[in-house]
Image (cartoon, grey):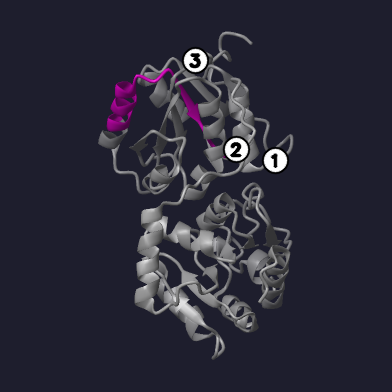
């Protein structure tokens, strides 16, 4: 092991993951590897505001710095916040930084910030020569030499500095206080304690990753004979979407609309206690993987790297010539990779997973 890759003396590490909540979750095995591969290590997460919400539930994160980067999010708020982030990195007196990216992102803006903050070791993938900005530099070979799952990409990155772990599942630790709060919400809604249910998460931050509302209504209606309540979830911004889906379900389906009612910890408990999650490919899928709840994943073919990791699942999509577009809005205007999935296939996948879990009534 050369001087650049020998991190045996590294104790304080800042891990930088600046995109979405699901991306942070898919980085948690690499965080665990960093923690477990050195005595007395302390991990700080530098993340976007949405990603930073996960910190209380991640056992390998000690501290958090929130930062909305201009090269990742359109909502970044100006140079004063960039300077503040560099100052926070300086105050941290970090021995090393690890910058986690998908292959379509550049690590170099974050590397420059770390360099200006005086962090002596900076690890990241980079396609172009970073010169003194990275040490060590891990050459990015994706996508030309094949595409790895996002989790594996980050595990491979930290392995270059000797960081490995046996448990490579995603991390999310639910809390008793959140389960008590969830129980209070369910009681207020009139849901009997012990009632078995399926969670259906019908939204996503990107329009290109949303299965059509009519398709969701028809698919959920086909689950009526399962004898379970369908818990509809989403953000407060998705209330209208979820209301439309609920309104078009067949009469007699036991539906409970929890859209906008749950904090993140409560939502994770809801998923953990569910028999099944049906969802677009978005953050809740990765929460389900972390808490080991089976998933029917309506998987838009915008990106091949983010399938459910180490959890029972069914991946539903329609193969299309325009796949792997990496777009938030379908450039063709039809979302065919999702809307081509028949509702009957969604229901069939749900039945299959419940049978595998041996929890059919």
| Label 1 crowd bin: few (<14), some (14–19), many (20+), radius 10 Å | some
Marker disc for residue 226: none
Classify mark 2: helix, strand or loop. Answer: loop
Rendering coords of residue 194 (x, y %): 50, 72
Q: Is residue 98 left or right of residue 69?
A: right
Of pointers 2 and 3, the one earlier in the residue sequence: 2
Image point (59%, 58%), residue name: 293
The image shows residue 17 at horizontal and vertical percentages of 47, 38
* Residue 264 visible at all: no
Labels 1 and 2: the sequence-earlier one? 2
The residue that disc 2 covers is 103
The front one of 34 and 176 is 176
Q: Quadrant of residue 225?
A: bottom right
**Magenta stretch bounds:** 83-102
The answer to whether the residues at label 1 and label 2 have Cβ atoms under 8 Å apart is: yes
Which residue is denoted by mark 1 in the rendering?
A: 147
Q: Is residue 98 magenta?
A: yes
Query: How many other residues sit within 10 Å of disc 3, few (<14), some (14-19) or many (≥20)?
Result: few
Whole-Å distance between the Cαs marked 3 and 1?
27 Å
Residue 42 percent location from the top left of the image: 42, 26
- Dot 2 crowding, Cα within 10 Å, few <14, some 14–19, many 20+: some
**What residue did someone put label 3 on?**
132
Residue 284 within the magenta-colored segment of the rendering: no
Residue 119 position (above or below residue 53):
above
The answer to whether the residue labelled 3 contacts the one labelled 1, judged by CB atoms less than 8 Å apart, is: no
- In the figure, is residue 36 to the left or right of 303? left
Q: Which quarter shows the C terminus?
A: bottom right
Q: Secondary structure at mark 3?
A: helix
User: Between marks 1 and 2, how big is the CA–CA gap?
Assistant: 9 Å
Instruction: Return the residue nearer the eye: 337 or 307.
Output: 307
């Amino acid at each position: 092991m050369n001087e650049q890759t020998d991190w045996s003396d590294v104790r304080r590490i800042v891990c930088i993951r600046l995109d979405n909540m699901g991306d942070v979750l898919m980085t948690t095995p690499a965080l665990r590897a960093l923690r477990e591969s050195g005595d007395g290590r302390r991990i700080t997460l530098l993340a976007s505001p949405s990603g930073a919400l996960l910190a209380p539930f991640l056992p390998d994160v000690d501290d958090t710095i929130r930062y909305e980067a201009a090269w990742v999010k359109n909502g970044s708020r100006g140079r004063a916040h960039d300077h503040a982030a560099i100052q926070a990195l300086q105050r941290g007196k970090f021995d090393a930084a690890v910058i986690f990216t998908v292959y379509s992102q550049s690590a170099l803006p974050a590397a420059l910030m770390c360099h200006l903050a005086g962090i002596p070791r900076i690890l990241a993938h980079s396609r172009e020569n970073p010169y003194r900005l990275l040490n060590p530099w891990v050459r990015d070979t994706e996508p030309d030499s094949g595409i790895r799952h996002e989790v594996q990409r980050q595990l491979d990155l930290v392995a270059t500095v000797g960081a490995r772990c046996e448990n490579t599942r995603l991390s999310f630790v639910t809390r008793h206080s959140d389960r008590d709060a969830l129980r209070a919400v369910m009681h207020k809604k009139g849901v009997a304690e012990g009632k078995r249910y399926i969670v259906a998460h019908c939204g996503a931050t990107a329009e290109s990753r949303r299965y059509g509302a009519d398709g969701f209504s028809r698919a959920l209606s086909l689950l009526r004979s399962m004898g379970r309540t369908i818990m509809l979830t989403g953000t407060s911004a998705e209330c209208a979407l979820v209301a439309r889906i609920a309104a078009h379900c067949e009469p007699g389906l036991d539906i409970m609309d929890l859209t906008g009612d749950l904090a993140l910890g409560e939502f994770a408990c809801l998923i953990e206690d569910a028999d099944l999650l049906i969802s677009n490919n978005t953050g809740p899928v990765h929460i389900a993987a972390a808490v080991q709840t089976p998933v029917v994943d309506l998987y838009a073919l915008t990106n091949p790297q983010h399938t459910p990791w180490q959890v029972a699942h069914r991946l539903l999509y329609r193969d299309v010539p325009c796949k792997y577009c990496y777009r938030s809005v379908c450039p063709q205007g039809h979302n065919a990779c999702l809307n081509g999935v028949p509702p009957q296939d969604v229901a069939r996948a749900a039945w299959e997973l419940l049978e595998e879990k041996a929890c059919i009534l």
